[in-house]
Image (cartoon, grey):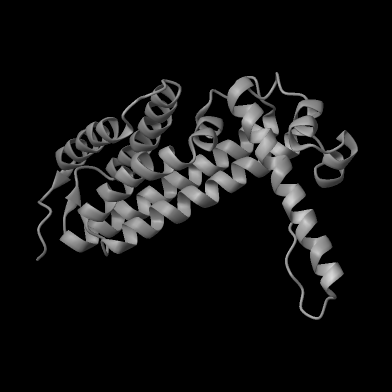
Amino acid sequence: MQYSDVKELSPAAKRRIREKQERYETILAAALKFFSERGYNKTLIEDIANEAEVSVGTVYFYFKNKEDIMIKLIEDIGVILRKTLGEEFKKGEGNIDGFLNAGRVFFYKVCKKYPEKILLLMRESGCQTPEIEKKRQQLFDRLINDLIKALTKIKERYKIEYKSKMSVEVIATIIMGLFEKISYHFLIKNGTDLEIIGQDVIDFIYGGIKNLVIGDFHDN
């Protein structure tokens, strides 16, 4: 459910729309807090309602059930990730530095700014519902596809070749797996220096890409 300002409404109507949007976001924030700290199964609708300072009935007015809330949170995280990393890659105009900088931004900025959201997305999902896992996997597939497109642009930019027809998909899948496991592992450790960890991961990725490339990253 989305609320947006509509022209020609009275001030009172606009206020009601704004209050509904604020309540909606407050419920999502409360759910995010509990899901990331306790896990999905151990969180009750009553917990979310109490944290958001609304009634249980109000939560059900905005969301069908707990599963619906989780799916919405995953969708929100996906928008943040794809927008932030995509914009960073575009700054490099298809070069390898833009690709690597997008990876750094994931650790330096996204994980630092949205640790609960990243934990929620990267948490092992075996105790969640099939619909939640389906939504989570759909997002991972889109992110892998984004990586494949970026690696293809790099190929065109430098007029290089990958060693096999599967190299691009292999690289993209490995990168997604690294981001998933590394971010979750270190975000649950308080005080972890994500910039150091992030740079280690980026150096590892760069070495792997170079090993699967025929040619070099020099503009022709």
Going 80% across and 68% down the picture, which residue do you hit?
14
Quarter of the picture holding the N terminus:
bottom right
Going 69% across and 47% down the picture, which residue do you hit?
25
Asked if one can make out residue 158 in the rendered structure from this viewpoint, the answer is: yes
Q: Position of residue 15 (x, y in %)?
A: 80, 64
- Camera-side residue of 63 and 49: 49
- Camera-side residue of 98 and 167: 98
Q: Position of residue 220 (x, y in %)?
A: 9, 66
Q: Is residue 61 left or right of residue 187?
A: right
Numbered circles on residues, count: 0
Quadrant in which residue 89 is drawn: bottom left
Q: Is residue 72 above or below residue 44?
A: below
Q: Position of residue 201 (x, y in %)?
A: 26, 33
Asked if one can make out residue 1 in the rendered structure from this viewpoint, the answer is: no
Task: Please identify the residue farthest to the right as the structure is shown.
Answer: 57
Q: Is residue 123 left or right of residue 202?
A: right
Task: Please identify the residue farthest to the bottom as the structure is shown.
Answer: 8
Quadrant in which residue 165 is drawn: top left
- Camera-side residue of 14 and 120: 14
Q: Is residue 83 left or right of residue 70?
A: left
Q: Position of residue 204 (x, y in %)?
A: 21, 33
Going 28% across and 51% down the picture, which residue do you hit?
99
